[in-house]
Image (tube, helix red, strand yellow):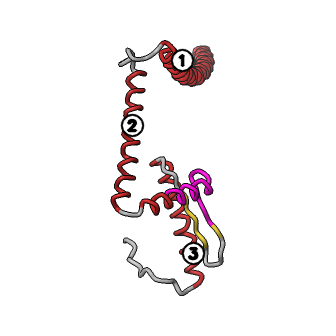
Amino acid sequence: MGRGKIAIRRIDNSTSRQVTFSKRRNGLLKKAKELAILCDAEVGVMIFSSTGKLYDFSSTSMKSVVDRYNKTKEELDQLGSSTSEVKFWQREAAMLRQQLLSLQESHRQIMGEELSGLTIKDLQTLENQLEISLRGVRTKKDQLLMDEIQELNRKGNLIHQENVDLYEKINLIRQENMELKKKQIAAALMHLQR
């Protein structure tokens, strides 16, 4: 059964209002954190309760979020008209396109493509970056292999112990069988002597 819709208006019961505030506040802060992590966004949320208590979350520092907000608001206020706002967003888009091109060029160089325009110093820097990355990959691979070897050794020790236990049980059963045979022979001999 789904939840019914509630009217969005002030809750009269103070206890219900406090419970709803607490749950919705936690939900809002959780969503803000998820947005910051999933989308690499700079997020800041401030909530003042009816009693004046502050609750906040910021993905960086609240001061930097507020400063960035104020700076952007000032820039947009200065732009004023919609044509200026369009120009602002065109500049933003051009800057992002340039960053994308730079990242694509860097990726191609890391893949060993389009190296003709690079100087010896650029190539040396690229080589150093690749060596650092390769060391990180090898370290991770070695760690995974070591973990796997330890797990296999642990399983091997368990199997060895099981084999030892089974061998001891087999020996015990053999001894019991030998004792039973001796008893059978002794019983047969006593039967023959009568």
Q: For mark 1, give the secondary structure.
A: helix
Earlier along the polypeptide chain: callout 2 or callout 3? Answer: 3
Q: Which residue is drawn at 38% across and 77% down?
A: 5
Of the residues tagged 1 and 3, which is closer to the observer?
A: 1
Which disc is residue 19 wearing?
3
> How far apart are labels 1 and 3 at the CA level?
56 Å
Amino acid bearing label 1: Asn
Start-end of magenta stretch = 55-72
Check disc 3: other Cα within 10 Å, few if <14, some if 14-19, many if 20+.
few
Q: Is residue 62 rendered magenta in the image?
A: yes
The answer to whether residue 118 shows anywhere in this view is: yes
Q: Residue at x 58, y 56 (%)?
A: 67
Q: Is residue 180 rendered magenta in the image?
A: no
Residue 27 lies, with reference to residue 142, above or below; the image says below
Check disc 2: other Cα within 10 Å, few if <14, some if 14-19, many if 20+.
few
Closer-to-camera residue (32/182) = 32
Which disc is residue 170 wearing?
none
Closer-to-camera residue (59/191) = 59
> How far apart are labels 2 and 1 at the CA level?
25 Å
Which residue corresponds to mark 2?
Answer: 98
Residue 148 is situated, as x and y percent measured from the top left of the image, at 54, 23
Amino acid bearing label 3: Val
Which disc is residue 128 wearing?
1
Q: Residue at x 43, y 22 (%)?
A: 110
